[in-house]
Amino acid sequence: MSDLFPAYCELISSPAQLARCQEATSVSELLSVIKSLWQQTALSDDQLIAELVQLNQQIIDGDKIQLAGHWLPYRYHAKSRSIHWCLPAGHATEPFQDETISRYRQTVLLNQFITPKTALTSLDIQAKAVQSITPAGFIFHLSRCGSTLISGCLSELDTSCVFSESPVLTDILLDRELGKTAQQQYLQQLIDLQASVFPSRPHVVIKWNAWDIFRWDLIRAIYPQVPCIFLVRNPVEILASHQRSAGRHMSGDPTLAGVHLVFNKNQVVPVSLLDFRIDVLKELLAEIQLIGAGSSVCRVDYHQLDLDKLSEICTYFRIPFTSKEVSRIKSRLGFHSKSPMLRFNEDGVEKQKLFSPMDVKRIEQILLPLYNQFSKNN
């Protein structure tokens, strides 16, 4: 272990030292500040960078540092059982949190040189330093049905903080070596720690992955009172969107095999890619229909999403909003949810033309009954 390890731990734990580092506007200035703080002015820049590389590889015990409230936990590495942290730079406005994290790591100079890692088992030490929160709302969805649009619009509110498919939460849920109780503990701690770096935005909204609906019981047991939205869309349009660009759960990703048997089905009895995707969507629809039948949740169809429906969702999540914020939401509605720089054009009819009439008929025969039943209960 480097002799500079104590100084490294002190720097990442000290708001004052972090503030000094973040005042630096160039690499040379940042390295000069770190050398001064560590009383290592004799080191060359290359020597200091080499030391930092070595220090960043250490998995630190939680009792040696204090990251809570300053650093954002953004990734969980299952093999090493470690949590990776970065410094944030404003709340998330991007469609997905991994894009927000990329912005943090590219624009915050210190993130390019200091990347602390802590042991998963020491999360409780960090979490004890912050307030436990209850999220304002959860968004569950079938994918490609407006969840990204909703989360993007909610991010326009001054008091909201949106975590859209947070990678660290996904990683915890996908680690099959963790038991249910441990996953629940770590999810709650990570949500608290992520929220703690945005104290001026107390209304936390989490958009889960499409396949996380299969972990409903686990998630709902932690937060039984959190308002939930279930989003659906015409199955032909959903599958057509994946035909253009397949999402992770529609691509046969083997890391999802432990989530539900349907993701392993193609490995046992090979089927066409469309048949695989129909099976996946069928199971998602069945699950969301089953849960929605016995729960107090808000059911929303993609084609209902307009300014009035977004206002209803804000009210449902009990997030206050002003006329100015409504104007920002209205403006956001005019742009593509996943490419906010592009104007939005309704493409439902165009999507349905991607399949042959025979494929459309097959999709509708298998999936429309579930979709219609869900919509009927709306």
Image: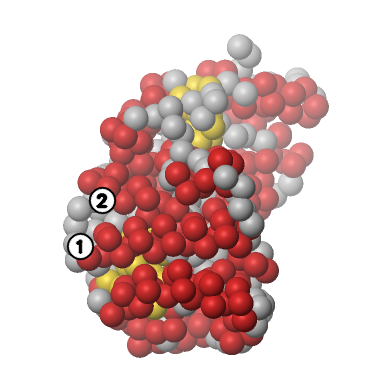
| Position in image of residue 304 (x %, y %) | 39, 84
Of residues 172 and 234, the one nearer the viewer is 234
- Amino acid at pointer 1: Ser
| Residue 352, percent from left and from top | 60, 81
Q: How many other residues sit within 10 Å of disc 2, few (<14), some (14-19) or many (≥20)?
A: some
Q: State which quarter of the image contains the N terminus.
A: top right
Is residue 186 visible in this depiction of the protein?
yes
Residue at horizontal 41 percent and vertical 52 percent from the top:
212
Determine which of the numbered discs, if any, sits on residue 295 in the image: 1
Apparent side of residue 130 relative to residue 28 in the rendered image (left or right): left
**Image spot of residue 52 (x, y percent):** 67, 26
Image: 136 above or below 131: below
Looking at the rendered structure, which numbered label has been put on residue 191?
A: none
Give SS at disc 2.
helix
Of 356 and 289, nearer the camera is 356
Residue 91 appears in the picture as rendered: no
The quadrant of the rendering that contains the C terminus is: bottom left
What colouring method underlies this structural image? secondary structure
Which amino acid type corresponds to the residue marked 2 in the rendered image? Arg
Please determine whether, in this image, residue 45 is positioned above or below residue 4: below
Q: Earlier in the sequence, mark 2 or mark 1?
A: 2
Compared to residue 224, the image places residue 352 above or below, namely: below
List the residue tagged with mark 2.
Answer: 220
Crowding near the residue tagged with mark 1, few <14, some 14–19, many ≥20 C-alpha atoms within 10 Å: few
Q: Is residue 98 left or right of residue 120?
A: right
Report x, y in % for residue 322: 34, 82
Front-lying residue, 113 or 45: 113
Residue beneath the point at 35% across and 36% down: 183
Closer to the observer: label 2 or label 1? 1
